[in-house]
Amino acid sequence: MGARSKDWTNQHNSPIIGAVLHQGRKSMTSRVTYSDDIADRICDELSQGVSMRTICAAPDMPNRRTVMRWMDDNAEFAAKCARAREIGLDDRAEEMRERIEVEEDVQRARLIFDYGRWYLSKLAPKKYGDRAALELSGPDGGPVQVLDVTKLSDAALAEIVAAGNGEADACAGTRNAAEMGMGA
């Protein structure tokens, strides 16, 4: 791999990334059995922002399917991995911010930011995704008042029509349809 990959490895001081970059892909026939030591190593790497794919590519680590099976079979391990992944995403966000601050090329800084924001929003949409809020409120910001027009008399509906802006014609049609068992 190029110098850039090695620089990234040195930055993260990760033995797993170093092993993957320097030894290449491992054999799919290697078997690794679950142990607390391996689980802790996986979680440690995840918390440093290393992807599960990279971790599992290391020669002395289980393949990705095995780790997924361990997570299915062991709720405690799955929870530890999830928490480690959250920490790792926070680490990636901080690293992205630091890289942008020292980047002299504005275009490159923008690209780093846009990619990082997109990537984080896909992996953790609740935390890093765009927030869209829809709020429905009544008059003066108060609660919405719901009126069941199917239970109103014709006189009450006529009063609403007289006081309103003509939208009550639709309400009268709803009431008539409801009375006939047709729904609206």
Image (spheres, rainbow, N blue to C red):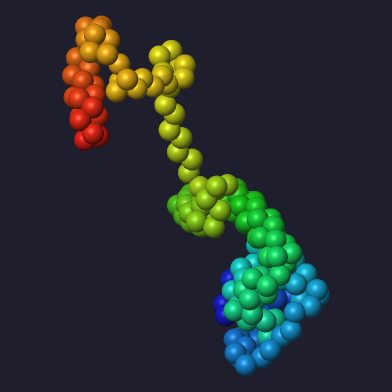
Question: Residue at left 64%, top 67%?
Answer: 50
Front residue of 10 and 167: 167
In the image, residue 30 above or below residue 131 = below
- 178 versus 77 height, above or below: above
Question: Viewer-proximal residue, 119 or 162?
Answer: 162
The quarter of the picture where residue 132 lies is: top left
Which of these two is toward me, 119 or 161? 161
Rendered residue at 27%/13% (across/down): 153
Q: In this image, 54 relative to 173: left or right?
A: right
Instruction: Locate residue 88, reporting x and y percent.
Output: 66, 59
Quarter of the picture holding the C terminus: top left
Residue at image position (24%, 29%) is 178
Q: Identify the residue at image location x=57%, y=77%.
A: 2
Classify residue 31 by image quadrant. bottom right
Q: Position of residue 159 (x, y in %)?
A: 25, 7
Q: Residue furthest right?
A: 37
Vertical position of residue 62 compared to residue 152: above or below:
below
Relative depth, front residue between 82 and 11: 82
